[in-house]
Image (tube, coloured by chain):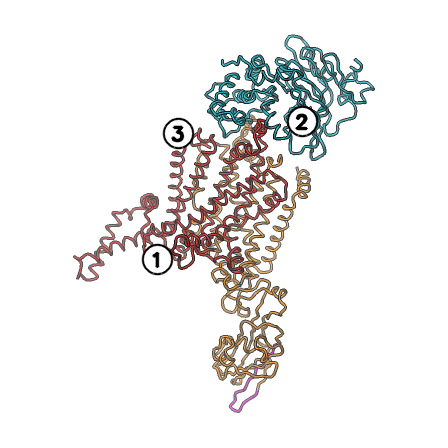
């Protein structure tokens, strides 16, 4: 009901300042220590995102999607081994910022996150409204103003304002997820990362949440980064797709292209495995297992399972540009 | 906010009723045990005899009567009293319930052998005289224990695997030994060998007149017993609470709090400490109950004039009314401790207030 | 399953040195207990500890342990016994049909500190008068008693308490004065001493004498105020403590565990009743009640054990187990068991309990020290088993005899240290097991 019709001054001002891509990631690496060695969770990821685009990050479990999000938001685990690369947000390399500045300027104010399992994302002993308003209170906004804004975002996500005064255990699963989304929106970020926002919910609630996200996307013109392994539902929101495999980015295409005719062999197999409603097709599967991120093989990491591999694949391919898309596959060399 | 108060109030009431019921049952059991050998009956009858005897021998109308006549009167009146007070009825349920009621309402009658320092033989006075000493010692020790353990545990949870952390983990088994045990060693070192602190007792003798001097003397005498109590429980408490903190700091909402841009102090305070308080309070309650039990021996070792030592003295001379009185008092004290901590728990954990009576 | 266990244990043992340390400690105490029970059988231990006439006569009072000698330059005095029959007897027939009997009790004193007591025991078949004299190594002869009447049978002459003798020795207590070096009265004279007993007896009568020079140090553990060798109680404290601790732990914890499983599974009224009983038990003042019962009725260790178990079945651990069982109750394989028609008993005993039994182990081990100390607590308060020698008993004796005031630290420290080590041994194992078996802790 309380739809926001005018753009916030922050965003209006921001778009006046910087005309380039909202987000540009260069050679992002995230490795961490495990008891048996070093796990190379994110390896040399490169991509660019224009303003207002929703990108879906697809891939199997363990391919590095969540680690990518963590790397962008600098939510690093205790056992970090390597963290390098460049992340340009609106032209500024945020990797260079100190911890304090990053926490103050970037986290939540520019990029916010909706994490997996909202069941546990809310502090059980604090009131929901307080937690939602907390990012604003941190920025020294007055209490009344902050709670008013909380009421607003609750309206956007579709949760009755009465629940501001409740505790997490009094909300249903779907409502909790919406509250988390509201929390992500409250500080007016330019980008929201959603990590498996609906995987823990039942199908009906999933649909509701997806609709809410669609609506928010339209009203607010934000960037969403939707990390998920649920290919089908991601197609409703995505403008672009980042496909990850074994810690690497293997394809970055526009959504229409990806969901119909992806370029990378892995992506092709992935789409072939998704059952479709209208077209009669037999879902396929990919043989073998994804490689361990602990000791990935030399050369193209998908080669052992690729149905289109050839000799060149013994060497690791770079990211080739193919029209509007980028692909990490020798098949697209020199094009 | 008003809703919170209402919920808390309801919870407080329910818990009070529940605990009272538990106290009743506990005391009933005590009464039964105490009277298994006929002790309470004997005491009661002796009391009646005393009261009746007083009445008869001091009645001016009886002056001049021969002893045998007076004795006969006493006997008669005693029998009358027995019947009146229902002492000729069976133990279950009549007499036991009577005793129970007496116990609950803190009417313990007169001590058999002991006196309060002020000279009263009323058990209630004796108890009340000694109670503050115990409370002072106990409350101080528990407060120090709680705050110290909390602070150090929180500190350690940030430094997992550090030398200090591993040292605490290694020291945790030291709490296998109770406080009084360490008390003996402390006395040995500081009072006997080094002679810097007093052997025992609450204040120096004679007690100082000036309030400031009294307070200082009191504090000086409290150092060793409080230290003993704290040492006996601190390492295991730090260890278990720091483990709680470690476990709870890997919760998703902590991640999210960090992602939201909260400072690490704010995260620690609101997202790690607050949600972890409920289990901490639960384990602390158990520690407190164990400490209450150990208090008896501790007061014995340090000759601290509290109800623990009173109990010990009473059992040495076999003063049944005092014995029963102390046990009843203990029952109430324990119930009070449970109640207070339950209440704190309810303040800290909103989940409890909603489902009243359940946890 | 067995292989998994072995693999688990070896790998984990290396990572947990405290576990190894605990196991070693407990093992040592088990060995100690076995030794105690074998070398001093139960009835013997009770008899010794009860004491009484004749049992500890030859032992010094409040003697320090012999290993104190290692820490002093002086040679601390030890007990010397010249037993009956060891003396040299000479008989001289007299005119009136009697005989004069002279018994010579020689001994060698090679210590640098004085003995703490001196006593002579005589055994005669008939009443007689005796004269006792003391021969020092440097040739002096001191008459101790002259013409003292000895009764038939056994008589004890407490030389060190003889006031007249003390005056004779310039105010020095006899056990010191008789040994004092005339040139340096603060030190004893080393050398060969003799005690000579002369008496006139009838021809058919006999007289024998025994001398005991009580040393400053005695035994591995020292002695107490009743001259009892503390080693008896120090040794026996181990099996008593172990037995009490383990039996109480088994009785209480296992019962709690089983009842928690039963209650949680059957749910409804039974579950509520159990919970409620636990709450009541929580505020029941256990120790005071134990003391009261010990005082009014019986202090036998078996009574106490039974009571301790009974009062600890519905302990707080019940609630912990209950929450674990509640979680387990919802799991799929329980549902499957129900589906194939398994009865309640089967589900409880075949599925629920075994699944959580591993978590029982660390709790069980951790609770043993508290019971060991509970038994010690009761003993320290004077309410321990009246006939058993236990560590708590020693501490009780020591404390009531003012050991700390008198500087007899070994009396308290030895049993206390043993108690501590036993408790710590179990605690080390328990804590390590807790870290191994508690799944939540592994993610940390």
The chain whose colour is orange is C
Q: Is residue C379 above or below residue A261?
A: below
The label shown at residue A95 is: 2
Q: In the image, residue C370 lies at what x, y percent?
A: 52, 48
Q: Is residue C94 magenta?
A: yes
Chain A tint as drawn: cyan
Subunit bearing disc 1: B
Mark 3 and mark 2: span between their CA atoms?
50 Å
Residue situated in front as seen by the camera: B23 or A154: A154
Where disc 1 sits, the SS reads loop
Chain B tint as drawn: red
- Which is more foreground, mark 1 or mark 2? 2
Where disc 2 sits, the SS reads helix
Main secondary structure found in the magenta portion: strand
The label shown at residue B331 is: none
Q: Earlier in the sequence, mark 1 or mark 3?
A: 3
**Residue underneath mark 3:** B6
Are circles 1 and 3 on residues that touch, CB within 8 Å?
Answer: no
C187 lies left or right of B80: right
């Amino acid at each position: 009901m309380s739809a926001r019709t005018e753009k916030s001054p922050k965003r209006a001002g921001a778009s006046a300042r910087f005309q380039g891509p909202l987000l540009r990631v260069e050679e992002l690496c995230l490795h961490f220590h495990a008891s048996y060695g070093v796990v190379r969770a994110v390896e040399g990821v490169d991509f660019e995102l224009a303003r207002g685009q929703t990108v879906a990050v697809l891939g199997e479990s363990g391919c590095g999607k969540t680690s990518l999000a963590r790397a962008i938001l600098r939510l690093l685990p205790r056992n970090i081994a390597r963290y390098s690369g460049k992340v340009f947000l609106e032209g500024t390399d945020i990797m260079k910022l100190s911890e304090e500045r990053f926490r103050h300027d970037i986290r939540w104010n520019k990029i916010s996150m909706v994490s997996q399992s909202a069941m546990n994302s809310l502090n059980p002993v604090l009131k929901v409204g307080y937690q939602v308003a907390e990012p604003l209170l941190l920025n020294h906004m007055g209490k009344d103003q902050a709670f008013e804004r909380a009421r607003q975002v609750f309206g956007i996500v579709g949760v009755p304002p009465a629940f501001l005064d409740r505790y997490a255990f009094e909300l249903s699963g779907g409502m909790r997820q919406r509250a988390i989304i509201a929390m992500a929106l409250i500080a007016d970020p330019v980008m929201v990362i959603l990590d498996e926002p609906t995987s823990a919910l039942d199908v009906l609630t999933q649909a509701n949440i997806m609709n809410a996200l669609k609506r928010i996307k339209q009203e607010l013109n934000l960037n969403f980064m939707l990390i998920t392994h649920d290919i089908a539902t991601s197609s409703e929101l995505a403008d672009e797709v980042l496909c990850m495999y074994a810690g690497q980015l293997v394809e970055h295409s526009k959504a229409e292209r990806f969901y119909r005719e992806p370029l990378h062999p892995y992506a092709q197999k992935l789409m072939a495995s998704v059952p479709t409603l209208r077209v009669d097709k037999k879902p396929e599967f990919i043989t073998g297992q994804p490689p361990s991120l602990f000791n990935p093989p030399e050369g193209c990491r998908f080669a052992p399972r690729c149905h289109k591999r050839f000799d060149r694949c013994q060497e690791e391919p770079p990211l080739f540009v193919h029209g509007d898309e980028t692909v990490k596959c020798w098949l697209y060399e020199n094009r | 906010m008003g809703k919170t108060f209402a919920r808390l109030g309801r919870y407080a009431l329910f818990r009070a009723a529940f605990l009272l019921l538990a106290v009743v049952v506990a005391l009933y059991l005590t009464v039964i045990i105490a009277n298994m050998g006929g002790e309470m009956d004997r005491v009661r009858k002796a009391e009646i005899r005393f009261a009746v005897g007083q009445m008869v021998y001091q009645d001016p109308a009886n002056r001049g009567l021969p002893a045998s006549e007076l004795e006969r009167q006493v006997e008669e009146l005693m029998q009358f009293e027995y019947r009146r007070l229902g002492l000729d009825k069976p133990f279950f349920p009549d007499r036991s319930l009577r005793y129970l009621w007496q116990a609950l309402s803190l009417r313990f009658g007169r001590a058999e052998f002991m006196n309060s320092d002020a000279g009263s033989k009323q058990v209630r006075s004796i108890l009340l005289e000694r109670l503050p000493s115990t409370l002072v010692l106990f409350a101080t020790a528990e407060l120090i224990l709680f705050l110290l353990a909390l602070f150090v545990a929180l500190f350690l949870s940030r430094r997992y695997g550090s030398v200090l952390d591993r040292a605490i983990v290694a020291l945790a088994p030291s709490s296998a030994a109770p406080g009084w045990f360490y008390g003996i060693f402390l006395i040995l070192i500081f009072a006997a060998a080094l002679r810097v602190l007093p052997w025992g007792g609450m204040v120096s003798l004679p007690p100082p007149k000036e309030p400031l001097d009294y307070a200082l003397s009191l504090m000086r005498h409290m150092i060793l017993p409080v230290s003993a109590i704290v040492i006996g429980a601190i390492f295991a408490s730090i260890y278990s609470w720091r483990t709680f903190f470690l476990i709870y700091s890997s919760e998703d909402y902590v991640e999210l709090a960090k992602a939201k841009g909260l400072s690490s102090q704010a995260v620690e305070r609101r997202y790690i400490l607050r949600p972890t308080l409920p289990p901490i309070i639960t384990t602390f309650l158990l520690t407190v109950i164990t400490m209450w039990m150990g208090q008896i021996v501790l007061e014995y070792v340090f000759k601290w004039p509290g109800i623990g030592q009173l109990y010990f003295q009473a059992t040495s001379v076999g003063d049944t009314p005092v014995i029963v009185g102390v046990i009843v008092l203990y029952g109430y004290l324990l119930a009070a401790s449970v109640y207070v901590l339950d209440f704190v728990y309810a303040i800290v954990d909103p989940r409890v207030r909603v489902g009243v009576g359940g946890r | 399953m067995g292989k998994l266990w072995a693999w688990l244990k070896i790998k984990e043992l290396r990572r947990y040195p405290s576990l190894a340390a605990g196991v070693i400690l407990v093992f040592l105490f088990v060995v100690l207990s076995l030794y105690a029970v074998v070398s001093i059988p139960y009835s013997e231990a009770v008899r010794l500890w009860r004491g009484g006439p004749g049992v500890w006569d030859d032992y010094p009072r409040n003697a320090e342990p012999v290993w104190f000698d290692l820490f002093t330059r002086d040679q601390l005095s030890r007990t010397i016994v010249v037993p009956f029959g060891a003396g040299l007897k000479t008989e001289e027939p007299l005119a009136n049909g009697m005989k004069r009997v002279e018994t010579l009790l020689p001994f060698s004193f090679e210590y640098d500190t004085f003995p703490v007591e001196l006593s002579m025991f005589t055994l005669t078949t008939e009443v007689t008068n005796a004269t006792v004299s003391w021969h020092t190594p440097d040739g002096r002869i001191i008459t101790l008693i002259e013409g003292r009447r000895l009764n038939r049978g056994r008589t004890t002459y407490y030389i060190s308490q003889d006031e007249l003798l003390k005056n004779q020795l310039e105010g020095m207590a006899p056990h010191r004065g008789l040994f004092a070096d005339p040139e340096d009265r603060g030190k004893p004279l080393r050398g060969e001493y003799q005690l000579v007993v002369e008496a006139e007896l009838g021809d058919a009568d006999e007289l024998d004498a025994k001398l005991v020079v009580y040393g400053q140090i005695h035994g591995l553990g020292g002695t107490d105020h009743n001259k009892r060798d503390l080693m008896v109680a120090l040794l026996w404290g181990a099996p008593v403590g172990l037995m009490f601790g383990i039996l109480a732990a088994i009785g209480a914890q296992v019962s709690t565990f089983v009842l928690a499983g039963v209650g949680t599974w059957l749910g409804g009224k039974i579950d509520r009743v159990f919970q409620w009983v636990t709450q009541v038990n929580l505020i029941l003042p256990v120790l005071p009640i134990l003391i009261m019962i010990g005082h009014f009725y019986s202090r036998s260790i078996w009574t106490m054990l039974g009571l301790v178990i009974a009062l600890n079945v519905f302990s707080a651990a019940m609630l912990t187990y209950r929450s674990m069982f509640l979680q387990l109750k919802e799991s799929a394989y329980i549902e499957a068991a129900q589906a194939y028609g398994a009865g309640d008993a089967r589900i409880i005993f075949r599925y629920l309990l075994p699944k959580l039994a591993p978590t029982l182990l660390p709790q069980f081990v951790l609770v043993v020290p508290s019971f060991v100390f509970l038994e010690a607590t009761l003993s320290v308060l004077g309410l321990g088993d009246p006939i058993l020698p236990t560590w708590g008993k020693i501490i009780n004796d020591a404390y009531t005899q003012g050991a700390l005031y008198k500087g007899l630290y070994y009396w308290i420290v030895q049993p206390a240290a043993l108690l501590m080590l036993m408790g710590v041994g179990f605690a080390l194992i328990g804590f390590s097991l807790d870290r191994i078996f508690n799944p939540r802790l592994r993610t940390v």
